[in-house]
Image (cartoon, grey):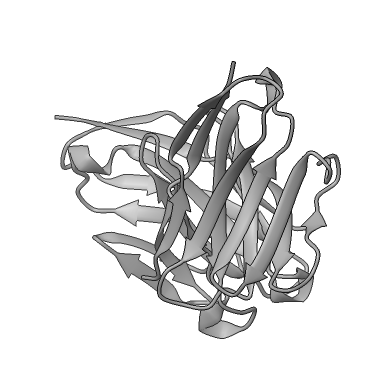
Amino acid sequence: GAVVSQHPSRVICKSGTSVKIECRSLDFQATTMFWYRQFPKQSLMLMATSNEGSKATYEQGVEKDKFLINHASLTLSTLTVTSAHPEDSSFYICSARAGLLGAKNIQYFGAGTRLSVL
Amino acid sequence: GNSVTQMEGPVTLSEEAFLTINCTYTATGYPSLFWYVQYPGEGLQLLLKATKADDKGSNKGFEATYRKETTSFHLEKGSVQVSDSAVYFCALSDPHQGGKLIFGQGTELSVKP
């Protein structure tokens, strides 16, 4: 299957700082990337959908000024958690998809980033 | 709207036991169906998929058949191993609704030696 790389795998930061998480599709061009948040023992919560070259679409209740998403190329999307606070501590997972139809409509996931805000 | 319901876990089995994890869905269109697996501390890995009714997805001994008449996509494996211990997510994707993945709540499987 296709490979999606997410970096860093774990980050610990102080309250008030910003953290950037990268998501790269290594062997395919991702027209769409997704960002999820997962709380312990729970399913994935979609935060936003980003299409290359356009603004991200955020799910209801997700602050777009808090979680900045950039999808500047077909292989890279970044999520920046601005002015992080302890309540932002979570497991963040990205996924990438080559297209919407047929075999391209499969999301491949990164390994996740564990964010801990002190 | 579209939704996915999975059987609740945790499911605990002995090695070599038969596994079934039930998954049912509601959808207005003709979604694709997926099973993903998540090992502790990791992201999700695609386990198998089916894109239309009566399709059977299979991988690593796991199987699931897209049943439109019962709106189900149950995951089965004939003989589980300790290494199969993980959380399993059933999901659907409807291209006519942007192709977002709608996940079930996940089912934790624990296989004991």
Camera-side residue of B94 and B63: B94
Instruction: Assign the C terminus of chain B to one quadrant of the image.
Output: top left
Residue drawn at 47 percent across, 38 percent down: B107
From this view, report whether residue A86 is shown above or below residue A104. Answer: above
Camera-side residue of B86 and B1: B86
Q: Residue furthest top?
A: A118
Q: Is residue A53 left or right of residue B49?
A: right
From this view, report whether residue A100 is shown above or below residue B113. Answer: below
Residue drawn at 28 percent across, 53 percent down: B77
Q: How many marks?
A: 0
Camera-side residue of B81 and B98: B98
Q: Residue furthest bottom?
A: A102
Camera-side residue of B101 and A58: A58
Residue A43, located in which quarter of the rendered image? top right
Instruction: Assign the N terminus of chain B to one quadrant of the image.
Output: bottom right
Image spot of residue A16 (x, y percent): 71, 23
Q: Residue furthest front?
A: A17
Image spot of residue B86 (x, y percent): 35, 39
From this view, report whether residue B48 is shown above or below residue A115. Answer: below
Image spot of residue A111 (x, y percent): 43, 48
Image spot of residue B93 (x, y percent): 64, 66
Residue B97, located in which quarter of the rendered image? bottom right
Q: Is residue A10 left or right of residue B69?
A: left
Can residue A12 be seen here? yes
Can residue A44 be seen here? no
Q: Is residue A2 left or right of residue A42?
A: left
Residue drawn at 57 percent across, 75 percent down: A105
Residue drawn at 66 percent across, 68 percent down: A72
